Structure formats: structure tokens, C-alpha cells
Image (cartoon, rainbow, N blue to C red):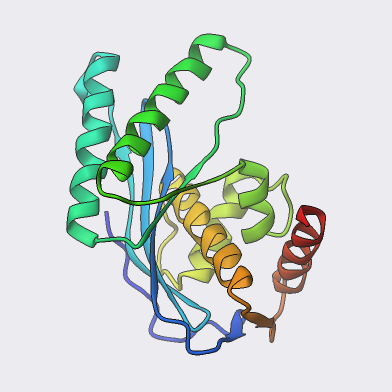
Amino acid sequence: MTFRKCSTTPKFLKRRTHNVARLRVMGIDPGSVTMGVAVIDFERGRATQIHLQSVSLKSFGLFTARLGAIYAEVDRLIDAHAPDEFAIEQIFMYRSPESSLKLAQARGVAIAAAVGHGLAVHEYMPAVVKQAVVGTGRADKLQVQHMVKRLLSLTDNPPADGADAAAVALCHCYRRTSLAGISADVVGVEKTAMQLLAQSRYRRRSR
């Protein structure tokens, strides 16, 4: 499912850049039942949605068949959208070792598809993604959906897993452009000041 962009430019996120070329990033929220996929363009501080989807894998039946579907879908979307870089959420441990193992395998298959296309893989913990996009590492799915909708100027609420994938891609863009020396100039309301403050704190802790 693809969502239209609002015609108005979002006022809450403006950045000054130094003629940095467009960056196209594919973000993945891995899962063995539902996988989130997003492709965004990031240029001069503005993010544009190219593709955003929650891919249901239930119809493929057996777990091994679902792994094959993950590989095929990621491979197809890389061919279709030609991302420059690939970002994926890092694994975190569930209470169930079996669930953790299945997530790890689903994640590994998606990574294999990206590596097969020669893409470097960038990995981010869920809390880091939430902090970069929402402003707190404890944000829930509704908060992530809300901020992704605003940051990408979507007219409709994105599906939960697709929003998580878009958040991973956005997190990578913010980290990538920060490392490239882009300064952030916030003219904003609501959560924007908190969002960029959180990013700044994270960068200081990472040094």
C-alpha cells in the first residue's frame, strides 16, 4: 500500500544542508509474520516517501516458505527502487527463545538480500530509532506512526510495521547527515525540539 504526500511542506522540520546529494534509504522492520518495508529519499533535510508497506507473510504458510518470501520481496524492492543504503532494526531478545530465533532468521534473510545487491547494512536498536524519530526511546507504536506521518507528510496513518521501517530509514538519514556535517535548524512546534535534543544527546554519548 502506497500513501500520497500532503501538498503542503511540513513546517516542523527544516534543516540547512551543504549541497548534499539525495540519499535513498531502504528501511526494514524485520518479522517472520509481518515485515515492514520503507524506501525514502532524503535531500536537503527533507524526507520523501517512495514506498511504505507492511508485508503480511501468513499466506506463505510454513516458516521456511516465509523466509523465502522475505528474501524475494526485499530483493524485488531493491531492484524496483534502487536504494543507496540499507538500514534494519537490530534484534532484541524476547521472553521466548523460539521467537527470538525466528526473528533473527527473518532479519538475516533480509540482510542477505541487501548484501547480494552490494548494499552496506546499517543496524539500529529499537530504542535508538524511537529516540531519533520521536524524541524518546520508550515511544509506543502509535507515537512512531504519528511522527512518521508528519515527517513524511502523509495524508493517512501508515501501517504500524511500515511506519517502524520508515522510522529506521529516517533514523539512518539523521545519523548519516549528522556525520556528514549537516547542522539542524529547528523551526518547530510540539515534539520537534525534544526530538533534536534527544539526537544531540545520543551523539554525545556515542563519542
Would residue 193 be found to the left or right of residue 142 on screen?
right
The front one of 76 and 84 is: 84
Residue under the image location 46 percent in, 24 percent down:
104
Question: In the image, is residue 196 above or below residue 124?
Answer: below
Q: Residue 129 at x, y = what percent?
A: 61, 51
Would residue 89 be found to the left or right of residue 128 on screen?
left
Q: Residue 36 at x, y = what percent?
A: 39, 43
Would residue 79 be found to the left or right of residue 114 on screen?
left
Question: In the image, is residue 143 above or below residue 190?
Answer: above
The front one of 91 and 32 is: 91
Residue under the image location 36 percent in, 74 percent down:
5
Q: Residue 125 at x, y = what percent?
A: 62, 41
Give the quadrant of residue 179.
bottom right
Residue under the image location 72 percent in, 69 percent down:
196
Question: In the image, is residue 31 above or below residue 126?
Answer: above
Residue under the image location 32 percent in, 44 percent down:
114
Q: Quadrant of the C terminus?
A: bottom right
Give the quadrant of residue 93.
top right
